[in-house]
Amino acid sequence: MTRNDKRIFVLLPAYREAGVIGGIVSEIRQRYPHFSIVVIDDCSYDTTAQEAALAGAHVLKHCINLGQGAAVKTGVTFAIQNAADIIVHMDSDGQHVVSEIDLLLNPLLSGKADIILGSRFLANQSNVPTLRRLVLKAGILFTWFFSGLRLTDTHNGFRASTREAAQKIAINENRMAHASEILHEIVRHNLSYVEVPVTVLYTKYSLLHGQKSSNAFHIVTRLLWRKLFLE
């Protein structure tokens, strides 16, 4: 089965990304003209939505800021409702390399797994700042301890799944904890997964706009609370 036989949706949750979102959408359109590109604008107060639409994306807008997890959920729901066969998640700050979408799609199209997870540590090509690297490594241990998943990268927003897997994964965490929640859902539904090496580019822009390392404490606290008292 080739990608031309599949309806492939690329989801870009975005908040205040007017400076880069148009270029990302244009690059995806140029390289993958048959893909559907969906930008989920999480109530930006700049021109993110307009820039995305001008570049050729379908834009969904939140009327209040809910967080990246909520934006991903909105995008996944839209893709499923519009008969997506494969759903790709990407960050909208330019950290992910558009051409590496192929690295996610190839094993998915060959039926190797239900979900493909990008890892910035498999090829060691990402210029990860030292503090961020330490926080991410701690996240790997946390995920292994609580879910049993032995991964090399646990908070990477570059992933792809089949329609069937996406329908099973419930996203209830509105903000950054959704990345850990997705991993929990993989275990809960016994979904098959494969990690592939991807590049994460740390630039002055992405470091200003991306998740702060200090947010890791809040994510761990929230997930511990859910596991101990709500499950």
Image (tube, rainbow, N blue to C red):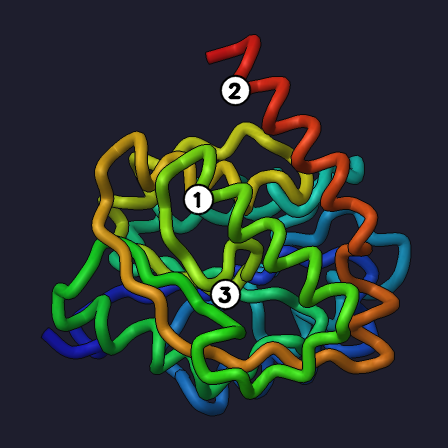
Q: Nearer the viewer, residue 83 or 92?
A: 92
Visible residue check, residue 63: no
Q: Earlier in the sequence, mark 1 or mark 3?
A: 1
Left or right: residue 21 versus residue 33 is: right
Q: Which element type, helix, strand or loop, lies under badge 1?
A: helix
Residue behind mark 1: 144
Task: Say which label, 3 or 2, has the lower sequence index.
Answer: 3
Residue 192 vs residue 33: left or right? left
Looking at the picture, how far across and down is residue 79, in whole percent?
A: 40, 50
Residue 162: which quarter of the image? Answer: bottom left
Image coordinates of residue 46 in percent, x first then y, are 89, 61
Of the numbered discs in the image, which one, if any, rests on residue 154? Answer: none
Mark 2 element type = helix
Report the amino acid beneath label 2.
Answer: Lys
Rounded to the nearest whole Å, what is the CA distance between mark 3 and mark 2?
Answer: 25 Å
Q: Is residue 79 above or below residue 77?
A: below
> For the point 66% across and 47% down, which residue is it?
68
Please report contact status of discs 2 and 1: CB closer than 8 Å, yes or no. Answer: no
